[in-house]
Structure formats: structure tokens, C-alpha cells
Image (tube, helix red, strand yellow):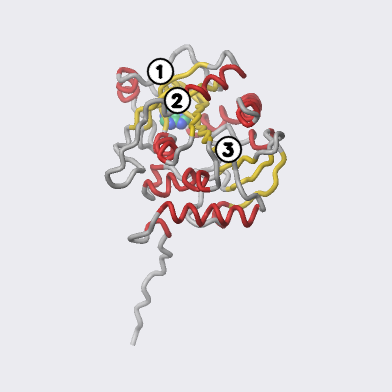
């Protein structure tokens, strides 16, 4: 007689029916405190394409953990994304949690997993959430390698991290105060409205023209759902995009993932140092 063995799929904790994503974020924060020895983090940063080196510049690394050791985190799907959580002691005595493990919406694991890192950061005590990404620029005056501040967003995923009738104000989602701090550090920083598409395909030129005509300046595949979850958790949000390429149809050559990664590599030293200076300013009361 043959026995049919059911495939063993570990159910992800956030997918268990009836599970509470905030409770799982609290458990994740407790694990981070235990494994890093750091009770509380003050600032959290998610480092997307091109931004990873900032972690080396903002302070002394206390501990680096593979994100998959922490409840609720998934393996990163993408080359160029380091699947780690890093606790860093900042010069003024505060601590930063650096999230190098983003789950993208296009991975199709559900919004809870996309925003789990942000909810965990909030549960560690962080009051400031800095979200960074690599994105396509719509303004023709922008150049690949240029960082821009996110002033607002248009979320074209038609999804939300909020569950049930949770109504959250998103006026000033990308804090004008923190943008002011960043622009004081680097007066040449331009800003723009980030439009999130689902991806993982890049946009068509017609979609880029639509994004432009509805008020967008930057197109990408991340960030908006995380920003909403951060606001729900009461955090102040700062967003940066690295323009890795001009958006489809704005640049005349086809887009490629290699080009995006390469632009990130080239720009990394400059934008990481900029981000480190902004973190120092924020953590010292800016
Ligand atoms: N579109 C969407 N996402 C991106 C792009 C783009 O042009 N460049 C880098 N990430």
C-alpha cells in the first residue's frame, strides 16, 4: 500500500488564518532585541538598490542578523538586496535598525509580508522610517545616478496594508519637516511624486506618460505600501529614490535590470554618504 505524504509547506506565520500581524511584529522586535542586545531602536532604514553602503557610514555596527532568523521575514527575491537586519549605534547614542531585506509586492506574498519590516521597526521603538529605492525618473532634466526626495506618492497597486475599516490620514505622508532636514544637508536635492506600479515588468512608455499626466515624477515597484504602514504605526516617513534610469520612453534605449544595478553601484558612494549625513542630522535632533 502506498502512503500519500502531503507536501510539507511551512505556513508563513503572517498567512495563518486569524494571525495578528502586529503581534508577529512585536515578537520579531523582541527577537531583534534579544539577538542584538539593543533594547530599542530609534530610526529605521530600508535600503533599496544603490543605498546599501549607507549602513557602513552611519555608525558602529552592533550586530548583523540574517533576516530569515526573525519571525515573519522572507528570503529576498532579488540580487542586490542583502537579506540582513543590522543594528547600528549612532554617534549621538541612538540606534538605527537597517533593513536590507525588502519583500516586494510583485513577489505575490501578500501585503502583510511587504510591510512586516516596517511594523517590526515600529515595534522596536523606531519613530522615524527612512525608505529608499531605485526608480525610473520621468523628468528629462534628471540623470541616472541622481538621488531625489519623495514628496508624495500615487499608489497604483490598488492595495493597502490597512485591514478592515482603518482610516489613516496621508496628508504630509512624506514628512515636510524631514525633507527640510535633508535639503538643509544637500540643498541641490530635488523632489518628486513617486508612482508605484505592481511590476515586476517595467512600465510601457504609455504607462509612463500616464504616470506623468496624473502628477508623477518617479516610477517604481516598492515603497508606497511600506510608507502607509509606517504612518499607521505613527512613524515619521522620509523617502529617497535613486534615479537608476530615465523611465521607459523618456530614455530612448530599452531598460534592463543590469542597468539598474550598475547605476546603483556607480552612485552608491555618493548617495550613501548623503544618506549618512541626513541620518546623523535627524538623530542629533534635526
Ligand atoms: N520602473 C520601475 N521600477 C524601476 C525602474 C523603472 O524605470 N528603475 C528602477 N526600478
Q: Tell me the distance, in whole angstroms, between the alpha carbons under discs 1 and 3.
A: 36 Å
Residue 255 seen in the figure: no
* Callout 1 touching callout 2 (CB < 8 Å): yes
Badge 1 marks a residue whose secondary structure is loop
The reply to whether dot 1 and dot 3 touch (C-beta < 8 Å) is: no
User: Which residue: 35% across, 37% down?
Assistant: 198
Q: Residue at x 60, y 46 (%)?
A: 40
Question: Tag on residue 136?
Answer: 2
In the image, residue 203 lies at what x, y percent? 36, 29
Q: Tell me the mark number nearer the camera, choosing from 1 and 2.
A: 2
Query: Of tags 1 and 3, which is closer to the observer?
Result: 3
Image coordinates for residue 238, horizontal then vertical, percent: 50, 29
For mark 1, does the 10 Å Cα neighbourhood hold few (<14), some (14 to 19), or many (20 or more) residues? Answer: some
Ligand number 1: quarter of image: top left
The alpha-carbon separation of the residues under discs 1 and 2 comes to 9 Å
> In the depicted view, which residue is nearer to us: 237 or 212?
237
The residue tagged 1 is 250
CA gap, disc 3 and disc 2:
27 Å
Q: Nearer the viewer, residue 71 or 30?
A: 30
Q: Secondary structure at mark 2?
A: strand
Q: Which comes sooner in the sequence, label 1 or label 2?
A: 2
State the residue lying farthest toward the front. Answer: 285
Q: Please name whichever residue, 130 or 9, is drawn nearer the observer in this view of the structure.
A: 130
Which corner quadrant of the image does residue 3 belong to? bottom left
The verdict on label 2 being within 8 Å of ligand 1 is yes
Depicted 239 relative to depicted 71: above or below: above
- Secondary structure at badge 3 equals strand
For residue 193, say whether it is visible. yes
Position of the C terminus by quadrant: top right
| Residue extending farthest left | 165
The residue that label 3 is drawn on is: 43
Amino acid at each position: 500500500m502506498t502512503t500519500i505524504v502531503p507536501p510539507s509547506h511551512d505556513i508563513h506565520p503572517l498567512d495563518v488564518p486569524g494571525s495578528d500581524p502586529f503581534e508577529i511584529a512585536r515578537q520579531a522586535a523582541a527577537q531583534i532585541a534579544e539577538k542584538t542586545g539593543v533594547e530599542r531602536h530609534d530610526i529605521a532604514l530600508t535600503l533599496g538598490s544603490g543605498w546599501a553602503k549607507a549602513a557602513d557610514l552611519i555608525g558602529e555596527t552592533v550586530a548583523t542578523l540574517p533576516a530569515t532568523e526573525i519571525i515573519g521575514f522572507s528570503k529576498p527575491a532579488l540580487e542586490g538586496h542583502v537579506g540582513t537586519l543590522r543594528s547600528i549605534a549612532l554617534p549621538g547614542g541612538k540606534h538605527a535598525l537597517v533593513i536590507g531585506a525588502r519583500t516586494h509586492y510583485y513577489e505575490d506574498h501578500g501585503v502583510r509580508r511587504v510591510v512586516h519590516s516596517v511594523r517590526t521597526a515600529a515595534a522596536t521603538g523606531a519613530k522615524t522610517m527612512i525608505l529608499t529605492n531605485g526608480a525610473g525618473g520621468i523628468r528629462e532634466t534628471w540623470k541616472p545616478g541622481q538621488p531625489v526626495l519623495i514628496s508624495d506618492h500615487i499608489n497604483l497597486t490598488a492595495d493597502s496594508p490597512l485591514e478592515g475599516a482603518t482610516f489613516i490620514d496621508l496628508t504630509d505622508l512624506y514628512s515636510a519637516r524631514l525633507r527640510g532636514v535633508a535639503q538643509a544637508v544637500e540643498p541641490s536635492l530635488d523632489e518628486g511624486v513617486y508612482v508605484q506600479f505592481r511590476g515586476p515588468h517595467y512600465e510601457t512608455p504609455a504607462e509612463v506618460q500616464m504616470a506623468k499626466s496624473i502628477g508623477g515624477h518617479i516610477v517604481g515597484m516598492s515603497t508606497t505600501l511600506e510608507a502607509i504602514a509606517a504612518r499607521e504605526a505613527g512613524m515619521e516617513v522620509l523617502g529617497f529614490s535613486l534615479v537608476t534610469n530615465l523611465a521607459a520612453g523618456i530614455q530612448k534605449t530599452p531598460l534592463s535590470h543590469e542597468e539598474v544595478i550598475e547605476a546603483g553601484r556607480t552612485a552608491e558612494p555618493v548617495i550613501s554618504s548623503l544618506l549618512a549625513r541626513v541620518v546623523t542630522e535627524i538623530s542629533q535632533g534635526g
